[in-house]
Image (spheres, rainbow, N blue to C red):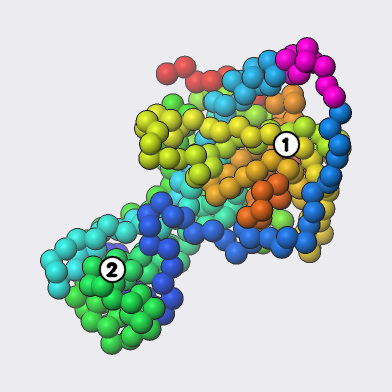
Amino acid sequence: MFNRIQQQFKAFLIASAVVSCAIPHCFATPAYAKFSNKYSAVQTQQKQIPETTKLAKSTKLGKLAKSTQPAVTRVVAGCTAKIYWSDNKKTYVVSAGGSGSGYFVTADGYIVTNAHVIQLYQNKKQCMKELVESFVVQIAQDYNLSIDELSQDKDALKFIAEHSEPQEFEQINLVILPNGEKLPFQAIASGAPDRGRDIAILKVNIKNASSLKLADSKQVELLDHITVVGYPGAADSSLLASPSHYVASFTDGKISAKKQLPDGSPVLQISAPATHGNSGSPVLNDKGEVIGMVTFGSDVSGFTFIIPSETISQFLWLAGVSNQQGLVTQR
């Protein structure tokens, strides 16, 4: 088994001509994550709202956040390896993969996230290729070489392949709970990210998990208030204490537009900002119910697109999973 991995590794090195992101925490963003800026948000005038009404709504949303947060998780998927380079007798640690968000839809451990979040975990060959690209970048940095030139030098890549040895290879499939507990997941079903089915269903071993109820997205109206709950990478500052990385972030906005993908699949545009790491984040109405899930967006703030809960419900039904609410597990 491991000999086959070594052979694949060397083959990737020799054939490699493109070098991508080499930073372990810099997770590759799918091409569809950058969307055309031809869409425009709905412009609206803000009406004056009495202070007492604002306070009541703020208190209600605060309670909503407290009750929904336990059901939202971080999802980490990909692969990692240690590679020994005999030329400088150094062992390199390389990683590839993605980090996103997810949420429980049943009390017994079924989680919904985006298919593209777990894509590299499911595609072992592609994940290994990205490990090789990461390794080549680190070699180039240590020897003060141009990454572009090195990646196109077949003789140099062949030399690197002959003098390197992968010592460990491990796939990563983890769900991280708000309390910091890490659970391995099993991928139950996964859709096509580029066809309006950017949905994956995961299963972890847990009982009485807090879960979210799916609302009827057909009832959603323009300018309805929504809240996005997830783990944006921008919030993972090195200045924060470690436990803070397990705390989900809340951002709010409104339904900006109802649109369709080229294949006719429905999507909703929201004004709430979302960034890398928010993929798979549940989007809630003011009742704390899921009306959709973040799937892609633009670098321009306010242009985030979500898969409606109607599509998610259909996907769950096809997988034989019933949306059930539960209580937080007492540990």
Q: Which residues are magenta?
A: 48-57
SS label for mark 1: strand
> Residue 243 at what x, y percent from top left?
40, 29
Q: Which mark is residue 196?
A: none
Look at the image and say whether residue 77 sits in the magenta stretch.
no
Q: Position of residue 20 (x, y in %)?
A: 43, 68
| N-terminal label among 2 and 1 | 2
| Among the 4 quarters of the image, the one containing residue 79 | bottom left
Q: Badge 2 local density, few (<14 within 10 Å), some, or many (20+)?
A: few
314 on left or right of 157: right
Type of the residue with mark 2: Gln
- Which one is in front, 174 or 284? 284
Image point (63%, 60%), residue name: 34
The Cα–Cα distance between marks 2 and 1, rounded to whole angstroms, is 43 Å
Percent across and percent down for residue 258 are 83, 48
Residue wearing tag 2? 141
User: Can the viewer see residue 244?
Assistant: yes
